[in-house]
Image (cartoon, grey):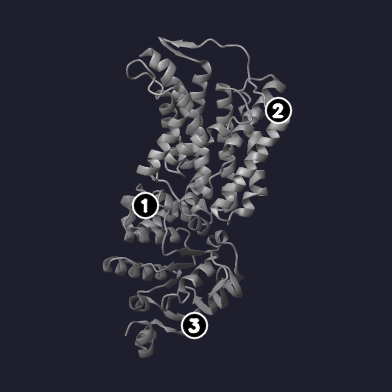
Amino acid sequence: MLEFVNFYLIPGLVLGAIYAIAAAGLSLVYGVMRFANFAHGDLMTWGAYAALVAVTGLGISPWAALPVAVAATVPVAWAVDAAFYARLRRAAPAVLLISSFGAALMMRAVVYFVFGPTPWTYARGVTPPLMLGAVRIQQRHLLILAGAALAALALHLLLARTRAGRAMRAMADEPDLARVTGVPVRGVIRLTWAVAAALAAIAGVFLAIDTELTPLLGFHVLLAAFAAAILGGIGRPWGAALGGLVLGLAEELATYPFIAGAPLLEPAYKTGVAFAVLVLALIFRPRGLFGGIG
Amino acid sequence: MSLLEVRGAVGGYGEADILHGADLTVAAGQVVVVIGPNGAGKSTLLKAVAGLVPLRAGRVVFDGSDITNRPAEELVGRGLAYVPQERNVFPSLTVEENLAMGAFVRPSATAAGLERVYALLPDLLPRRRVPAGSLSGGQRQMLAIGRALMLEPRLVMLDEPTAGLSPRFCAMIFGKIREIAASGAAVLMVEQNARPALAVADRGVVLAMGRNRAEDTGAALLANPEIGRLFLGG
């Protein structure tokens, strides 16, 4: 039982929390702009490397570098939107989608150019895990879980309690009606990019803390984030966050030896779980668990 | 002076024009109904006034200012509220959040607006915490009208407010329209349900092929045998 908690449940929750934060941003952009942004993973990467600059340059911890990561990623999202997406706002969805592939490759090229293809880490050495009774948890895992919970709470408060959040939800529901009620469309789009980029940067830093930095860091979880967003009902950030948690848990728990001492699924195949869940969701609940939009 | 003046409106979606020189005048406090066959351009005319469909030619003047092709989001602040025929509520927002959206540009007016709208449309009050997506068609229409009234607009534009509703709701909505007009706001509506609409209207405009075909008081249009034969189904 302890082995299950320490080696499967906690890593599953941590992975799920990272997926959740990534997917919430993805889903928010889709909801407000009806746009599947394939550059979201590279925004995560961008945020993670921005934190690396602060960690190595200022000698601070990656946790303290989170604001730097956010501050460096939001303007990139705004610039990419102004340079490419804003001009294509009325184009066919496929055109926007392909343009986001292009934006992703450009961002990734900058990362390759500056930092090279070799992996980086924020910190060397090993921090001993915390023991909560018999439950063993890595300090970083505890912080990632707490940070993800805080980010989710902040997103919830923004969407549910503020006028700006209500405008974002209104745009996601009915864009034309939102305009008629006086919602400043451009302002809401800018805010949406800021929130999505901040969430991407946080998810990127968390992922890099848990693993290592590579130029493909965010891209590798992009499809899982999409799967989570679709599972939760695309355009519904809360659904996406829950979908992320479910997928992260499913990936890790799929390798637990539930039957006869052998892993249910060899760990090498575990990333396939997210896509199996995605395919099942698309077949049996195409609008997601919470009824997506668009 | 008239509150809304549309002169020679030409425009539509993309390449194809739907309006071919339509005119419209609404005086303050008046109820004006636009009727006509399907495809006449009635809804397009409302959308053009609301800033949702661009005009290639013609002018729209509201309350003395030229609002031709102004962005939709700036009109509500000028006192012009628009209720589309479909997709006229935010389904994932609660009833009260939908109403609050009606006062989005002037949040300080939200509390007073809610009080006034709940007084006019008391059925909404017990459902205020319910998502608008779970309301019936008639309740949604009431909510959409309530949302439009939040900032005490000078002109409320309603696109087919009784489409698809039961006779009971239709009668209720036409009754509410008279109440809105009595409170001082002008109402401009497009209606397929032409006879009861003309009965509550001060003036009626008959639109066909994107042009004005006739214009008179509601009562006179109802009494006109040719209008009756051509546009009111005998």
Residue B168, numbered circle: none
Decide if residue A13 is on the left or right side of residue A111.
left
In front of the other: label 2 or label 3? 2
Q: Name the residue under label 2.
A: A115
The location of residue B47, given as percent across then percent down, is 51, 67
Q: Is mark 2 on a helix, strand or loop?
A: helix
Whichever of callouts 3 and 1 sits on the residue coming sooner in the sequence is 1
Give a yes or no on whether discs 1 and 2 share a subunit.
no
Q: What element carries label 1?
A: helix
Give the vertical position of A230 relative to A88 (above or below): above
Residue A28 appears in the rendering: yes
Give the vertical position of B225 relative to A63 (above or below): below
Q: Name the residue under label 3.
A: B212
Residue type highlighted by circle 1: Gly
How many C-alpha atoms fall within 10 Å of the one at disc 2: few (<14), some, or many (≥20)? some
Q: Nearer the viewer, residue A171 or B119?
A: A171
Decide if residue A247 is on the left or right side of residue A125.
left
Residue type highlighted by circle 3: Asn
Residue located 42% across and 46% down the image: A292
| Image quadrant assignment for residue A257 | top left
Q: Name the residue under label 1.
A: B133
Q: How far apart are marks 2 and 3 (CA)?
A: 68 Å
Q: Are marks 3 and 1 in contact (CB under 8 Å)?
A: no
Residue type highlighted by circle 2: Phe
Q: Distance between the residues labelled 3 and 1?
A: 37 Å
The location of residue A72, given as percent across then percent down, is 66, 34
Q: Distance between the residues labelled 1 and 2?
A: 49 Å
The location of residue B63, given as percent across then percent down, is 56, 71
Give the vertical position of A31 relative to A202 (above or below): below
